[in-house]
Amino acid sequence: MATPLDSNTTSFSGSPYSPDPWDLSSLDKLTAFDFLDNLALSAKVEKLNRSIQLQAENLKKRRDKVKKEYEVQKERVLQSVEFEKYKAKYGKDVDKLLEKWSDPQAVSAREKLSFVVGVSNIFITGLLMGGYPQWMHIWYTAQLLWFLPLRYWQYHQKGYHYFLADLCYFVNILLLLSLWVFPNSRRLFLSTYCLAYGNNAVAIAMWRNSMVFHSLDKVTSLFIHIMPPVVLHCLVHLTPLSVLQERFPAVARVKTQEHYTLVDMILWSSLPYAVWQLMYHLLITVRKANEIRAGRPTSFTWLRKSYANTWIGKMVLKLPNVLQEYAFMGLQYLYALATMLPCPLWFYYRPASAAFISSVALWSVYNGATYYIDVFGNRFKRELEQLKRESAKWQHKTAEPSPTLPAVQDGHFEELPKNVVELDTATSTSTEHKAKDNEITKRTTATTETHVKLKPEAETEAQTGSHGPITIEAEKDE
């Protein structure tokens, strides 16, 4: 049998020659250039691979750039949409406000109700403080359950609901928890006391809270700031100790058994303050950044605008925009600490606490008096100036020269136009005006019917009148 090694027969294709697969003679023809060509091919593949990677990186950079530009344009569009929405909303509010001011009944039923509620609140609060201080916390809670939902509805309608996250509302929530949920917690009570007597009470002067009874908004703001220290004053200094031991054991223990220093008060009040500040920063400053940039007001934007011309405002505004918010947070905490420094004095000395509450209450009364004088005084001044302008305009119109009554032609008066005939004189009275008009009408009628020529004296009197020239003026709709 023939094998492939010793067979040179024809192949299946009929070719007379078929190469031997085991023939290694062709290896002798390979040179070093053949190996170099193979290496060059590998280098070309590597170069092509690097080119592909470079193009991929460029495409990735372009993709990131386009994506970033898209995010920027998207943010601009969102801000524009928010701005247009707020603009339309505030435009409607301005139209409603103008419509309200144009109404002749300036005092609405809501303002009357607010006046009644404000005066009644002062009367009932004084009655409870003097006779039944142990019931003051119930009176406060009932009012808070009425004022807070009403404040939320009012501020949400105006776009001011970010103000509801301020510290003063947080202090009222802490006071409710201390009164009804954790009456045994001494630390919660001390924290609430320091924040209420510190930040809340002093804010009456800072935020210019006013005792304006006809304004429900101002009555609510004053209640939010002044009632927590009033309630705590009643608990600490006016409520009998037996009632405190039974109903508010934390207050009784702090008053009689445990003595807390200023450092203790500041330490325990700083903890809930830090919790509030962190929540405010995350939930309002960070999450609602687009709405704030679109123009929705917050405490920071209001203070930055109000104190822009003061030295502290100028100092904050010189900082970069990223640091202004943190600078405001730091200054706000320093302000809270400064207002809490006298808290041990208010807590352990009843006359000092009463004097402090009376002073902030009188401050709100002064702000209310300033509001009434400025608002209503300026309003009356504007109305008086408008009346003067209208009077000057009327006098200018009446002083203008006007044509006299037409003379008699051919024994007849010319036909009088359908205008109002007035006597242009400043000395004649309304009765004399009517008499002269009747006289002119009678003479005109008699002359027209009888065709009798008047005497020169009558003609002269008809043209000039006994008190001055007769003017003819067309009526104008004012």
Image: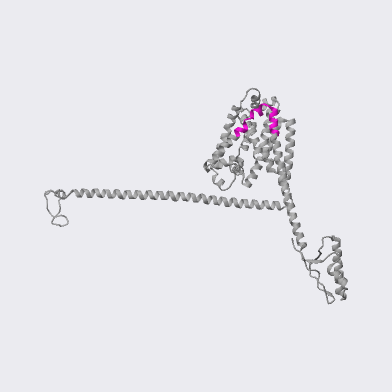
Prevalent SS, magenta region: helix
Res. 212 visible in picture: no
Image spot of residue 96 (x, y percent): 67, 52
Q: Is residue 346 magenta?
A: yes
Which is nearer the eye, 465 or 157? Answer: 465
Which is nearer the eye, 1 or 40? Answer: 40
Q: Residue at x 73, y 37 (%)?
A: 122
Q: Specify the farthest residue to the bottom.
A: 410
Image spot of residue 425 (x, y percent): 82, 62
Q: Quadrant of residue 195?
A: top right
Image spot of residue 141 (x, y percent): 67, 35
Q: Is residue 271 above or below residue 53?
A: above
Question: Is 92 positioned to the left or the right of 455 in the image?
Answer: left
Looking at the rendering, the stretch of residues picked out in magenta corresponds to 336-358
Q: Is residue 378 above or below residue 390?
A: above
Image spot of residue 202 (x, y percent): 65, 35
Q: Is residue 316 above or below residue 26?
A: above
